[in-house]
Amino acid sequence: MKKWIGILLCAALLAALPALAQQAGDIGAEQAKRIALTHAGIADPASAFILKAEKDLENGRTVYEVEFVVDGKEYDYDIDASTGQILAFDGDAESYQPQEGEITVSQALDIALEKAGLARDQVQVTQSRLELDEGRRVYEIQFVNGDQEYEATIDAATGAILDWDRD
């Protein structure tokens, strides 16, 4: 019986090795962002508003999904988390466009930064998205400065801060 348990444990460890090796060779979200910005020809990374840089599993492969906006144009990238290879990309105007009379995602970030008393070059944006919350279009903005985390919910129609949190 002990022999079978040992064999099963060895088999489980061998099965886990590819996943462990992939994690050990992970390029990280920051490198994935740099790869995407460079490929898109963005000379000044501060001009890009990062919407998303998250790890995901697609077709059995771990990738970083990187989305950002520059001058109203949205870019989407899938980057292999192990190698840094660009697997897919596009650049077009998508769902982050404001409706008539609404503020932009960049303006929502500026509102949140003003509330925090910070400038764009002092923070790393970890999330920004336009969402529907109880029938109201809102921007969910999250960013960090050092060990401080900030979260803001901003009304897309008025620019009013609906919710604010700092940890």
Image: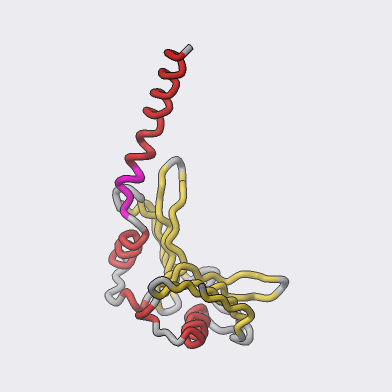
Q: Quadrant of residue 11?
A: top left
Image coords of residue 85 (percent x, y): 30, 51
Q: Residue at x 60, y 83 (%)?
A: 161
Give the camera-side residue of 44 and 17.
17
Image coords of residue 69 (percent x, y): 43, 73
Q: Residue furthest right?
A: 134
Asked if residue 19 is positioned above or below residue 166 in the image, the reply reads: above
Asked if residue 142 is positioned above or below residue 119 in the image, the reply reads: above
Give the camera-side residue of 70 and 117.
117
Q: Which residues are magenta?
A: 22-27
Q: Residue furthest front?
A: 2
In reply to whether residue 38 is colored magenta, the answer given is no
Q: Residue at x 41, y 79 (%)?
A: 71
Asked if residue 122 is positioned above or below residue 17 in the image, the reply reads: below
Scheme by which the image is coloured:
secondary structure
Q: Is residue 10 left or right of residue 44?
A: right
Image coords of residue 53 (percent x, y): 42, 62
Q: Quadrant of residue 19?
A: top left
Q: Residue at x 51, y 78 (%)?
A: 105
